Image (cartoon, rainbow, N blue to C red):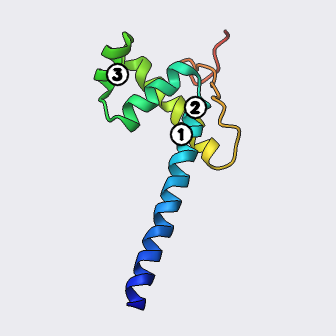
């Protein structure tokens, strides 16, 4: 009986940890800009394909991929204790130099 109680306690603790992680992920997604958060939510939480998200939002597949990259980087930063802000890098030309914007 004691062994069964320990087993149950381990899973209860794991469930509480899982809930905390889910809440942290939700807070991180909520911290993203609206469109970016929507893309991450549709792709990673609801499981839509890149094409399905693009069609649903009326944007190109490349836009969805870029928003996913920016959103996931910001989400990881948030979960590791950072600000979770999107950091955009400057576009580079074919020689690897930052282009003027």
Crowd class of label 1 (few under 14; some 14 to 19; many from 20; radius 10 Å): some
Considering the image in quadrants, where does the N terminus appear? bottom left
Which residue is label 3 attached to?
53
Mark 2 vs mark 1, CA separation in Å: 6 Å
Quadrant of residue 7 in the image?
Answer: bottom left
Quick one: label 1 or label 3, which is nearer the N terminus? 1
In the image, what residue occupies the spot 59% across and 39% down? 27
Measured as percent of width and height from the top left, residue 44 is found at 40, 37
> CA separation, marks 1 and 3?
19 Å
Q: Report if the CB atoms under discs 2 and 1 are less than 8 Å apart.
A: yes
- Residue 1: which disc? none
In percent of the image, x 42 and y 90: which residue is there?
2
Report if the CB atoms under discs 3 and 2 are less than 8 Å apart.
no
Q: Is residue 33 left or right of residue 6?
A: right
Q: Secondary structure at mark 3?
A: helix
Give the spatial CA distance, label 3 vs label 2: 18 Å
Residue 26's label in the rendered image is 1
Mark 3 / mark 2, whichever is N-terminal: 2
Q: Report the number of numbered marks.
A: 3
Secondary structure under badge 2? helix
63, 84: nearer the viewer: 84
């Amino acid at each position: 009986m004691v062994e069964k109680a320990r087993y149950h306690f381990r899973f209860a603790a794991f469930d509480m940890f899982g809930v905390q992680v889910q809440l942290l992920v939700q807070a991180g997604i909520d911290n993203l800009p609206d469109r970016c958060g929507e893309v991450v939510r549709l792709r990673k939480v609801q499981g839509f394909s890149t094409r399905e998200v693009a069609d649903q939002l009326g944007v190109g597949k490349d836009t969805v991929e870029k928003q996913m990259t920016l959103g996931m980087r910001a989400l990881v930063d948030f979960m590791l204790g950072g600000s979770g802000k999107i950091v955009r890098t400057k576009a580079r030309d074919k020689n690897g130099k930052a282009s003027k914007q």
